[in-house]
Amino acid sequence: MIATRTPQQTNAPVPRASVVASLDAVNKNYGSVRALRGVNFQVRAGELVALLGPNGAGKTTAVKLLLGLMPPHGGKVRVFGADPTNPENRTRTGAMLQVGRVPETLRVREHIDLFSSYYPKPLPSSGVLAAAGLEKIRDRKFAELSGGQKQRVLFALAICGDPDLLFLDEPTVGLDVEARRMLWEQIRQLVDRGKTVVLTTHYLQEADALADRVVVINQGEIIVEGTPAEIKSQTTGKKIRCITRLDPPWVRQIAGVTAVRSDRGVIEIHASEAEPVLRELLKQDPSLSGLEVTSAGLEEAFLALTQDSVRNASYGN
Amino acid sequence: MSTVSVAISRRQIERFPAAAVTIYWKETKYEFLKYLRVRMYTASVLSFPLMFYILFGLLLNSHDAIGGMRVPTYLIATYGTFGIMGASLFGTAAGLASDRGLGWLEVKRASPMPPFAYFWAKVITSMVFSTVIVLALFALGAAFGGVRMPVATFAKLFGTLVAGSLPFSAMGLAIGYFTGPNSAAPAINLIYLPMSFCSGLWVPVTFLPKFAKQIALVLPPYHLSQLALGVVGAGGHQSSWTHWEVLIAFTMICLGVARIGFQRDQEKMYG
């Protein structure tokens, strides 16, 4: 039910001029693996759009297609109205990709100096170092940096050319909470300066905290898109926990119950509304105890979305 | 409006050559620094040919001669070939395979870096290390082996050896495109060491068993070392043109193979 998209959602009236990058019915395969299937995706000027999905959903593939790092097997990829491999485009885009290994013997400032030289109008290196929080470690070699510092160097390389459009592929993966918040703050500042940002993440919380628009992708297909609030509202529900002598399969068939899990006597019920379910539970089991009702968290909403699409996909094939 | 855009495009055209020079310069400078700071690279690539030369050319056989040529002079040509071959193969192939396999090349490709600058930096860096090796061999030979030659001969030998870095850089690019981050170095050793032996870089080719002499004829390091030996008057009977032709053909083949790898990469995803 969630995975069906109304035509209004896909063909929202977007003024053509404001679309800076798009995938139009794009397919991409790796051998027999279909990484993207008929994906329509648009990036509008000045927005921060999050591509949200589990690992292997096709987020990185979408980014690499938009960066012109590989061609699609079908459909059209456009960036600034041109082919993404256009050299002129590359001077207007910046990218933070997931990298296994960066040259380790170069210093932070040397990496930035080199990448700045590629762009026609780079930011002053002092500005880049400040924006990425690298001033104190500018003379360190890359190998001597912590995980968070390494991510910040890659972020610095993405912004040093002062690009209009930024692609950040899982920018905060592997970072601790503090480092993640710091990077979020830097990403927000970019959007405040009028930059367009495409961010991929598998943290719903991150998409919620940063994005104007969230596009949920799973198994190579976009399953839903909207503002973070819209995404959450599509999967709102309650979580009921209690100790009961009732049988989980019986509980499952109460109207409004979407899922039941039992663990060492404690039963966990997901329901669209709590009250009718509670009434029924208490009627059938007066000895029910340890009752707890919470709203389903963001992670649950996300899981509900992606699992739903998995189910549909397996029926579809 | 239109005047503004015209002004911008003209400015871009004007700044283009200067900007391109800057990119090529910085790409090369940092590629060189990157390798200079990798101790494994500098230690193995620079010190092996020099150690061999000191041992076999200066300590053990310095008063002997090979085909009328004094050993310390003869071995500058052969260990010079050995040295530039190692510096060029490791300098291009190992870095390329690692950059490709571990995602760094994609970051560069996503940037406005001209792709040619990347290869240029690798080739020039290999040449710079080759220059250092050849000059160090000369210095050792002159100081401790009594090697003397006219300036013109020196210049010709030096130029031949450093130019000889090109075929092996091309070979390194080809290897780098068809090996992974962990397999590049073993693959190079597997090719480099037997090829050096069969080309007569360690033991003069005249002392090699007959089958090795036959193999040598198709090996690029043999042809480069023969060119270098020819400069100091210890070459074989083939004309230097034959050697140049073989080296040029070999370079072309390697560049062709590297190009196939380059194009294959555009289709593939890593990581």
Image (cartoon, helix red, strand yellow):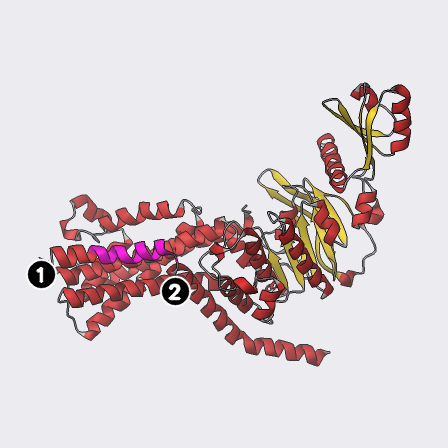
For label 1, the residue is B68
Q: Which residue is nearer to you in this view: A99 or B13?
A: A99
Report the number of numbered marks: 2
- Residue A272's place in the image compared with B124, above or below, is above
Left or right: residue A262 compared with residue B212 = right
- Contact between marks 1 and 2 (CB within 8 A): the answer is no
Q: Is residue B204 magenta?
A: no
Pinpoint residue B44: horizontal percent, then vertical percent. 31, 54
Does any portion of residue B239 appear in the rendered image?
no
Check disc 2: other Cα within 10 Å, few if <14, some if 14-19, many if 20+: many
Q: Disc 2: which chain?
A: B
Q: Is residue B47 magenta?
A: yes
Mark toward the viewer: 1 or 2:
2
Amino acid residing under circle 2: Ile
Does any portion of residue A215 appear in the rendered image?
yes
Tell me the tag on residue B204: none
- Residue B232's place in the image compared with A211, above or below, is below
Question: Which of the two discs, 1 and 2, labels the residue nearer the N terminus?
Answer: 1
Check disc 1: other Cα within 10 Å, few if <14, some if 14-19, many if 20+: few
Tell me the tag on residue B124: 2
- Magenta-highlighted stretch: main secondary structure? helix
Pinpoint residue A273: horizontal percent, then vertical percent. 87, 34
Pinpoint residue A12: horizontal percent, then vertical percent. 82, 53
Left or right: residue B179 compared with residue B86 = right
Residue under the point 11% across and 56% down: B61
- Residue A133's place in the image compared with B268, above or below, is below
Between the residue at mark 1 and the residue at mark 2, the CA separation in whole angstroms equals 35 Å
Q: Which residues are magenta?
A: B38-52
Residue under the point 73% across and 32% down: A311
